[in-house]
Amino acid sequence: MVGKGVGRVVRYRFKDSKGRTYEKTWIYIPTSVANDTAFPFKPGEKVLIIIDIKGKRLIIEKLEKEGNV
């Protein structure tokens, strides 16, 4: 059981077919963490992302129902 590792935040810029520019931000999770038996998410699963301003952290939780955001 690993439980933690060093990931990376990456921002991509791309243009769509109409020439509009967009940005996407990705958070890379190390394979050793994602393959841990305690890792709570499955590929493609929707998650809820919360910014905790006071705690200065990002919280990622399973999205129970899509309408509950």
Image (cartoon, grey):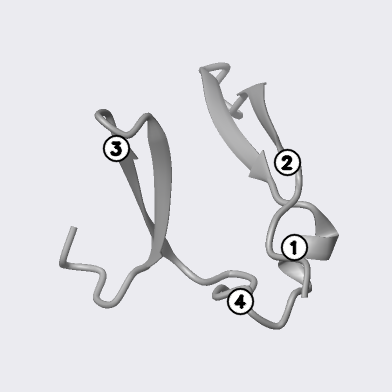
Image-based side of 65 in relation to 47, left or right: left
Front residue of 50/13: it is: 50
Q: Earlier in the sequence, mark 3 or mark 2?
A: 2
Front residue of 6/50: it is: 6
Residue 52 tag number: 3
Three-letter code for the amino acid on which mark 3 is drawn: Asp
SS for tag 3?
Answer: strand
Q: Are marks 2 and 1 in contact (CB under 8 Å)?
A: yes
User: Which residue is denoted by mark 2 in the rendering?
Assistant: 7
Three-letter code for the amino acid on which mark 2 is drawn: Gly
Q: Earlier in the sequence, mark 2 or mark 1?
A: 2
Considering every residue shown, the one lying at the far right of the view is: 32
Three-letter code for the amino acid on which mark 1 is drawn: Val
User: Which residue is denoted by mark 1 in the rendering?
Assistant: 33
Front residue of 63/36: it is: 36
Label 3: few (<14), some (14–19) or many (≥20) C-alpha neighbours in 10 Å? few
Three-letter code for the amino acid on which mark 4 is drawn: Lys
SS for tag 1?
Answer: helix
Q: Earlier in the sequence, mark 1 or mark 4?
A: 1
**How far, Cα to Cα, is label 4 from label 2?**
18 Å
Image-based side of 68 in relation to 29, left or right: left
Where the N terminus falls, by quadrant?
bottom right
Q: Earlier in the sequence, mark 4 or mark 2?
A: 2
Q: Earlier in the sequence, mark 1 or mark 3?
A: 1
User: Which residue is denoted by mark 4 in the rendering?
Assistant: 42
